[in-house]
Image (cartoon, helix red, strand yellow):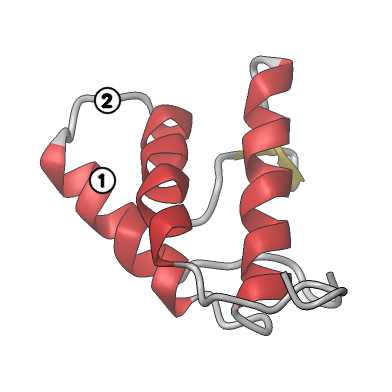
Amino acid sequence: MTTPLSLSGLDPPRRNGELAFDAPWQSTVFALAAAVIEHAFGGDREPFRHQLIEAIAAEPGRPYWESWTAALEALVPALPERSTPGGT
């Protein structure tokens, strides 16, 4: 990824300027979302941002990283189809 992930007001939690993860799975979800954004959407963060806004609005009391996971789960079925090597 070439630039830091920023979601305009929906930025991940930080402590002393560093991303704040309370459990290893949270950093994994962050990395997966960053990879999907970079590779499937050419770095366009807007599709993920839209899903994150919807996930937070659907359950405002849900912990942030669980909303992040829900947004990623909602985004994956909408991924653009790509042909794979070998024509499958």
Residue 13 place in picture, x, y as percent: 56, 40
Quadrant location of the N terminus in the rendered image: bottom right
| Among the 4 quarters of the image, the one containing residue 68 | top left
Task: Tell which tag, 1 or 2, sits nearer the viewer.
Answer: 1
Q: Is residue 36 left or right of residue 54?
A: right
Mark 1: give few (<14), some (14-19) or many (20+) Cα within 10 Å: many
CB contact under 8 Å: marks 1 and 2: yes
Mark 2: give few (<14), some (14-19) or many (20+) Cα within 10 Å: few
Judged from the image, the secondary structure of the residue bearing numbered disc 2 is: loop
Q: Is residue 70 left or right of residue 84?
A: left
What residue is rendered at 75% in x and 67% in y?
A: 4
Tell me the amino acid under the disc marked 1.
Answer: Ala
Identify residue for label 2.
62
Q: Is residue 79 above or below residue 55?
A: below
Residue 25 place in picture, x, y as percent: 66, 21
Q: Which mark is residue 46?
A: none
Quadrant location of the C terminus in the rendered image: bottom right
Judged from the image, the secondary structure of the residue bearing numbered disc 1 is: helix
- Closer to the chain start, of discs 1 and 2, is 1
Identify residue for label 1.
55
Q: Is residue 11 visible?
A: yes
Residue 71 place in picture, x, y as percent: 38, 48
What residue is rendered at 63% in x and 28% in y?
A: 26
Tell me the amino acid under the disc marked 2.
Answer: Arg
Q: CA distance from mark 1 to mark 2?
A: 9 Å
